[in-house]
Image (cartoon, grey):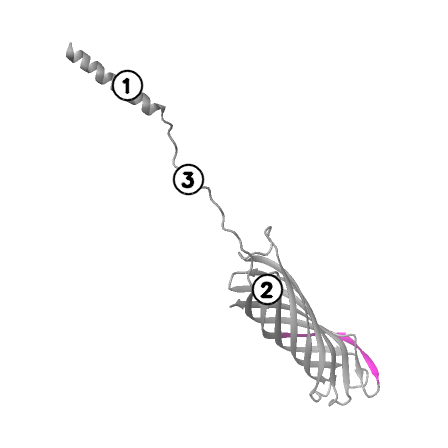
Amino acid sequence: MKKLVGLAAVTAVAFLTTAAQAADPVYPEYIPPYIPPVDEGLGGSFYLRGSVAGNSSWAGEAVHTETDDTFDIIENGWGYSAGIGAGYETGTGLRFDATVDYLSNRGMTADVDDGLGDRELDLRSTIVLANAYYDFGLSDMGLTAAGGAFGYVGAGVGVAFNESRVEDNVGYGEWGSNTSLAAAGMAGVGYDFGALVADLGYRGLYINEIENTDATPNYRVDDAWVHEVRATLRYRF
C-alpha cells in the first residue's frame, strides 16, 4: 500500500512539472534586423589627371593679312593631344581643375588659287585652361560615395600658345607663333572606382586666332574649332 501511494505521489509531481513547463512560452532565437550602412555622401578631395585625345580641326576661312584676301577652308585637319592637370572636387558634384595640353593638328586646307596649290596648315599648340565641371550620378541613387557610373558637363577658359606653318606645292614655309584666347566646352561619361576615376568625353576647343607673321605671305585663321574625343584618368589623394 505504501509503495502504491509513493508511486502515485511521484507521478503527480512529474505531471505537474511537465504541465508547468508546457505553460511557459518558447521564444525563437533573436536575430536583429539588417540595417544598411548610412551613405555619408561624397567628401572633397584633390586629384591629379592625365588625358589623351584624337582631334579634328575646322575654321571658316584663312586670311592673307597683308592684302586682306580671304580663302575658304575646304578640308579638316586631324591630329592628337595629350595633357596633365590638377584639381579639387567639392563633394557636391562640382569640381575645378587647371590643365595643360600639347596639341598637334595637320591638314586643315585653304583653297588658294595662285599657282602654288592649296595651303595645308601644320599646327602645334600648348593649351592652358582653367576648368569647372558638374558631375551627376547615372544610377537611381545619384552621385554617392559608393562610386559607379556618372555623367558630366564642363567649361574652361584660358590661352593657346600656337606655332604654325603652311605647306604648298613648293614645300613648308617658316614657322611662326602667336598667343590667343582659348575656351572649351566638355561633356562625357565615366566610372568612379574610388581612388581612380576614368571618363570618356567630348571637348570642343575654341582658338580665337592662329597667326603667322613670319610666313610669306603672312596669314591668319580666325575662330578655329578643334573637336576632340578624349579619355581621362584621375587619381584622388
Please name whichever residue, 24 or 115, is drawn nearer the observer in this view of the structure: 24
Between disc 1 and disc 3, the foreground one is: 1
Of labels 1 and 3, earlier in sequence is 1
Amino acid type indicated by mark 1: Phe
Whole-angstrom CA distance, mark 1 to mark 2, is 74 Å
Does residue 28 appear in this view? yes
Q: Position of residue 26 (x, y in %)?
A: 37, 29
At 60% across and 54% down in the image, what residue appears?
A: 142
Q: Residues within 10 Å of mark 2 (few under 14, many from 20)?
A: few
Between disc 1 and disc 2, the foreground one is: 1
Amino acid type indicated by mark 2: Thr
Q: Position of residue 60 (x, y in %)?
A: 79, 74
Whole-angstrom CA distance, mark 1 to mark 3, is 34 Å
Specify the quadrant of the image occupied by residue 126. Answer: bottom right
Task: Using the image, determine if residue 92 lies above or below residue 164.
Answer: above
Whole-angstrom CA distance, mark 2 to mark 3, is 40 Å
Please name whichever residue, 147 or 205, is drawn nearer the observer in this view of the structure: 147
Give the residue at mark 1.
Answer: 15
Magenta region includes residue 104: no
